[in-house]
Image: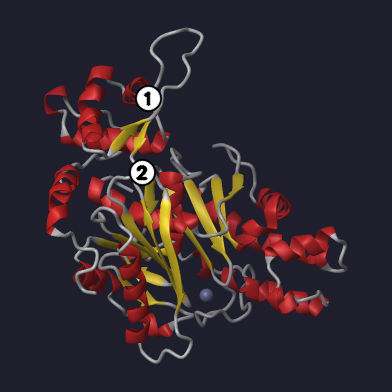
Amino acid sequence: MASEGRPSDSDKGSLAAINELFDEPVRPRGRNRGLISSSAIGLANRGRVLQVLFDLGPTSRAELARHVGVNRATISGIVQPLIDQGILVENDPLPSKESGGKPARPMWFAQDAAPICAVLLMHDSVQCCLVSLDGTITAEAKAAFPPDAASVGTLAETIYASIGQTLKHAHRPPLGIGVAAGGMIDTDNGSIVAVNLAPLLAGFPLGAELTRRFGLTTRVDHHPRALLVGDRWFGIGRGKRNFAVIYTGEVLGGALFLDGHLYRGPAGAGGELGHTFVQVDGGVCRCGRRGCWETIATLGWLRREAEIAGLPSAGALDSRQLVTLAEEGAAGAVDLLDRYARNVAIGIANLQQTMAPNFIVLHGDVVGGGPRLLDAIAVHVRELVPWRPGGDIELVMGDLEDRAALKGAAGLVLSELLHFTL
Ligand SMILES: [Zn+2]
């Protein structure tokens, strides 16, 4: 088990090529800065070009050149070695535009380049997959933690076995392991600080253990931040300068992308949005304090209120079922839907007032509520936030299935290897 995921001797040539590509000191200092001087075009410029490519999605050489602000020959000098090494691939030409000219061939990351192992660690389960550089997910596997686990060792064995199984499917040596974990994460050392729903995991040095066991670069971050990275690299947040992610379900969390950077705070302590206070002396939260946003905008609240309202199957209700009940005209469902939407909106309004992300991506259970719930939340947010210059507030749905978290976990490794600033 300990050697699983490590390259075999026959793989070492390709791994060396990848390392040569990724381990260079590419350190762009910010997306708004132009390329460094022409005499120093090279490693840093390559990182900058790849970052722009990720921001734009599949892009032709000419278009990429225009966005980076250099000529096409310079772009070709940077991307051709990456194409030759199988990192990038140029797809079939698009039909010529009416104006004529050379047909554009959109360039993107090759699906068969070395993958990244992505792990989603929640309080009751571990989910693993391989993510290719173009964001394709394969070799998915999910394992539940034994409900009677008495030690962190039992949980750790489940995690190792799941990752080991996934790594067996890698056709090339993986570039690293990215972990999105529920609970509070110390991102400086990749350890789990606390998980309210899984106390056994508290203090577990997950990053160090995975690196030791599998011999791969490992990055661990908070689940909502991984969602944000997934949206930023591979999804709806691509190319944005400011946006926020909110996740709701059994727990509530969030993450911020501000002025072109993921905001973590010291050791990753920032972004504990679920435990910001929305009710003075409100209900007791799992964290032990009172009145946290999490106490009024998660499934626990929804199910208790559904019980009081006498809705069917209240104990297992979720946003999707609530919207269905509201559309069927079930007594109390419309009222509960609106109150739930307002509770979710209150925390978003606080966030908007504090940081003005303007673009907010919702993930988790609320996504199941579809456009009706999204609209209801948006109406309340707009009522709660006074008009300010700087653009409208836009709320959008992310994914329900945590695909963004897995892609984001891979993105954590990708940004590390490419030396991009997240
Ligand atoms: Zn709390």
Q: Is residue 44 left or right of residue 107?
A: left
Query: In the rendered image of this protein, does residue 375 appear above or below residue 333?
Result: above
Which residue sits at x=81%, y=61%? 326
Query: In the rendered image of this protein, does residue 153 appear above or below residue 294?
Result: below
Say which residue label 1 marks.
Answer: 60
Residue 181, position as x, y percentages in the image: 40, 68
Query: In the rendered image of this protein, does residue 192 appear above or below residue 62?
Result: below
Q: Nearer the viewer, residue 352 or 298?
A: 298
Residue 362, position as x, y percentages in the image: 57, 54
Q: What amino acid type should be assigned to the residue bearing mark 1?
A: Ser
Q: Is residue 340 left or right of residue 225?
A: right
Query: In the rendered image of this protein, does residue 329 appear above or below residue 258?
Result: below
Determine the image quadrant of residue 121: bottom left
Which residue sits at x=63%, y=60%? 366
Q: Nearer the viewer, residue 141 or 386?
A: 141
Disc 2 to disc 1, how far (Cα)?
17 Å
Q: Is residue 39 left or right of residue 210?
A: left
Which residue sits at x=16%, y=28%? 41
Say which residue label 2 marks.
Answer: 111
Q: Total label count?
A: 2
> Which mark, by number, is residue 175?
none
Q: Is residue 299 left or right of residue 38?
A: right
- Which label's residue is closer to the chain start, 2 or 1? 1
Q: What amino acid type should be assigned to the residue bearing mark 2?
A: Gln
Which residue sits at x=69%, y=72%? 302
